[in-house]
Amino acid sequence: MNDLDLALIGNCQIAALLDRRARIVWACVPRFDGDPTFCSLLNGSAEPAAGFSDVELKGFAGSGQRYVTNTAVVETVLRDSNGGAVKLIDFAPRFEQHRRSFRPMMLIRLVVPLAGRPIVRLRVRPLGDYGAIPPATTCGSNHIRYLLPGTTLRLTTDASITALLEERAFVLDHPVALVLGPDETLADAPGTTAQRFLAETQAYWEDWVRGLSIPFEWQDAVIRAAITLKLCTFEDTGAVIAGITTSIPEAPNSGRNWDYRYCWLRDAYFVVHALNRLGATATMEQYLRYIINVATESSSQDLQPVYSIGGEPQLPERVVASLAGYRGMGPVRVGNQAYEQRQNDVYGSVVLAAMQYFFDQRLVARGDLSTFERLERLGEQAAARYATVDAGIWEYRGRQRIHTFSAVMCWAACDRLAKIAAHLEALEPAERWRAIADRMHAEITDKSWNEGVGRFTESFGNHDVDASLLLLPQLDFVRADDPRFTGTLRAIEADLRRGSHLRRYHAVDDFGSPENAFNVCTFWYIDALAATGRRDEAREIFTEMLECRNPLGLMSEDIDPVTRELWGNFPQTYSMVGIVNSAVLLSRSWEEAL
């Protein structure tokens, strides 16, 4: 049965997901939001006919899988019933070459005999147009070319081309290399190239991790989350995508299947916060550049909630009939109609993220008066829209309200503009934005606080709560020890907590009532508990959440609060960011621990 016990490899240009046997079940080319050349994760079958690449071991008896420590290189050991064993090493090349980043559209697999005389079949079965079109093939003495719509892939190998084309079994008595990438000739032998690229890639990741700032506790979890966050970065533009996949349902047969291979501006504040805490300043600076470019160069006054990884605004949503979906639970969607929605929180997200430009002296690019003036346009929109209806943080498709979180984020935009102006010693703008922010704060408090039920509410004039209200102290809208927030926290616990997990909301929406918990909301809850003095409880729930990761340390968007099965797009940036931020908040300091 398909599940999300998957490993992620990548190089900030492409990414691939491998199952427990190292079958490549998902990989898009030429970039994250491209056509999934390997798409069997979404073909509805546990034993697909195509859309994958694997090594089939005769007499298979079991497997084990791990990441090479502090890298994005995956090792999988397959064992047969006769004592034979094979090691598969999978990675996407990533290192510095000729004083620039080398991150080709390439996946490399080394197949190494470990014990006995293992008999294997090498199967490489790509598909095109979301699983609809099998490739035409041509071959040479050491390569196979797969002709797919819009691209041609070349598999260069020192294995038998006949054995690959005909998928003939053979005794693996020496290592073989498979290099799948652009239709270009390798400069060296496949095995030599693969070994050199492996050594260079491992050294790159080890060096990158060495430069991270990490807490004393939960180091393995934070490092894996940091590497995963890096792997979800499209380095060419700096965009950070919400997830590697599309259309993994949030819950079984829920229809909540969305394409997450894009960049949500809402994520900006949380991602920048995590990257800053990790000390990953180069990645953070690239992401900030993407955000600022998209936000300030938009031809429209309306800022979209989501953009493509290249910054393109149009993401028309369609359903593809050629894929049945994860476990057959379609539909499979390409594109995301949320780009057409009004979500007022994005103005605050961008300004909050951009503050790093003005206050972080490590950055090469620094914010100045000109940058501030460009951000003021976003502040003007925030001040005009904070008390107007929108789709909200949860992207309701059939409901418009004045959502408290959206309003608070608009206030945060104006509040931070006042702080930036003061930092720049621009006194008139500082006073003007402070007056605007104070007026907004008073009105939002008045409209979102429900005295009758003793809580802030998810929208003006309502009585329900949602998980976004947990962020009010983080955004400095209200103190964590304010009785109004502690009352809101109690209401959230009563309405949304299931075991140790939190749902986003309980209201019926376009698809019914949400079934599963939303992982980042649980991390927000953990942070809120710590902020209100319930630190021991926060640590206990955080430890439980780490146990909910898959065996490789990765986490998806959603979780069944009873069975702990992972659901939703995978891996989810929001969830990995939650691990980083909560670990840093809760960990004992190095001075305390040593």
Image: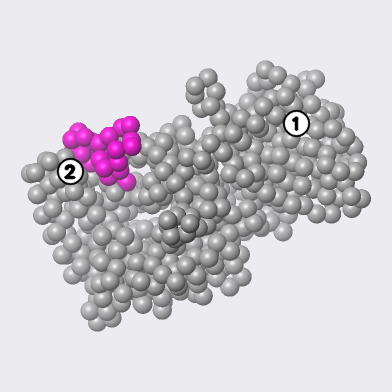
Residue 445's place in the image compared with 79, above or below, is: below
Mark 2 highlights which residue?
423
Pointer 1 local density, CA inside 10 Å: few below 14, some 14–19, many at least 20: many
Relative horizontal placement of residue 269, taking residue 183 as reference (left or right): left
Residue 109: horizontal and vertical position, in percent? 71, 36
Please give the label number shown on residue 156.
Answer: none
Extreme-left residue of the structure = 428
Question: What amino acid does circle 2 point to?
Answer: His
Quickly name the residue at label 1: 177
Whether 363 is among the magenta residues is yes
| Number of marks present in the image shown | 2
Q: Looking at the picture, which amino acid does disc 1 mark? A: Ala
11 and 218: which is toward the camera: 218
Does the rendering let one see residue 152?
Answer: no
Quadrant of residue 469 in the image? bottom left
Which secondary structure lies at badge 1? strand
Task: Give the magenta range.
Answer: 353-377
Instruction: Please tell me whether mark 1 or mark 2 is closer to you in this view.
Output: 2
* Residue 414 position in % (x across, y down): 20, 51
